[in-house]
Image (spheres, rainbow, N blue to C red):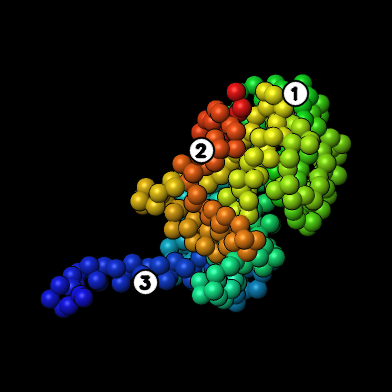
Amino acid sequence: MTTEATLDAARAEEFAGTVVGMLNGAMLGLLVSVGHRTGLFDTMAGLAPSTSEQVAAAAGLNERYVREWLNAMTVGGFVEYDPVATSYRLPPEHALSLTRASGPNNLANLFQFESLMGGVEDDIVECFQQGGGVPYARFPKFQDLMAEMSAQVHDAALFDGTLQLVDGITERLEAGIDVCDIGCGEGHAINLMARRFPNSRFTGWDFSDEAIAVARKEAAEFGVQNATFEVKDVATLDGTTQFDFITVFDAIHDQAQPARVLEGIAASLRPGGVFLCVDIAGSSNVEENLDHPMAPMLYSVSTFHCMTVSLALDGAGLGTMWGQQKANEMLRDAGFTAVETKRIPEDILNVYYVARQD
């Protein structure tokens, strides 16, 4: 039992300050999401110091809401305010982390997780009490958010970063091979590759009808004829269809049956084929994640989404932070005898596993 005699008052005060900071940050996070979704950060990045009326007019938004948002961003340290001119300014140094023009460096879009996860808090509390999980259908915006995040990386680094991690794959894609993206979501990576490599054939599989519809629409807009998309439960992979190159972008850790999916991928690769598995960078041991800059967010997202959607299907519930040790173990168990672990500077969240069956 802690008594007054053993209580460290300075430590208690310091922690209380930390909690207050978290509370302020959490509430500001909702407004950062609003600033991203409404384009306010993008608008302000192109403006000289401006009044709330000028910012609202430039963004095409309601001035009263914009003014309250600007004041919150001011006291939160995101925006600078000149009380004499009653003008607001987004410093260019801040814009680098908050605008769409920054590509993968844009952190503002990540704040959309806050409201998305908050929407299932009641469900999660019930899971704490009774077990089970929250089904994927309770996250109607998740596909769009993940598509936005991954597109930032793919647009900036797919050809000059990601594919360069796999020795010889660009030349093979140019010559013509069969490629499959497992859990393709809205299919942006497949469509980009299909447009760049017309001699290769691309297949995207995902269980979401809505995501596949978006993928097909983009393929039509791109005018590609060598990409097909199908609604498919990837846990049913059995090697019936063979590919030379298989990719998975951030989709293994929230599978209901991840071991079965990895075994199916291994069975679906032709001799000499390559599997590129992109997933969250971190350790399987919590004590090794203490200095991870985004570990609190990632464990939270895991609790509110990645772990629970797997458990909702009586799955493994690996969670977002399954970690590199567990990933390497499962890749070996699936039959991959050679696994390289790599990173690209454009992607701060993920590690890239290049796996082969030698």
Residue at 39% in and 52% down:
286
Q: Tell which circle, 3 or 2, labels the residue nearer the N-terminal end.
A: 3
Q: Is residue 43 visible?
A: no
- Kind of residue at disc 1: Glu
Residue 162 or residue 322, whichever sits in front: 322
Q: Nearer the viewer, mark 2 or mark 1?
A: 2
Residue at 60% in and 33% down:
335
Q: Position of residue 255 (x, y in %)?
A: 63, 52
Quarter location, residue 132: bottom right
| Residue 315 sits above or below residue 64 on the image | above
Q: Tell which circle, 3 or 1, labels the residue nearer the N-terminal end.
A: 3
Q: Which residue is mark 1?
A: 174
User: Which mark is on residue 328?
Assistant: 2
C-beta proximity under 8 Å, tags 2 and 1: no
- Kind of residue at disc 2: Asn
Q: Secondary structure at mark 3?
A: helix
- Kind of residue at disc 3: Val
**Left or right: 24 in relation to 43:** left
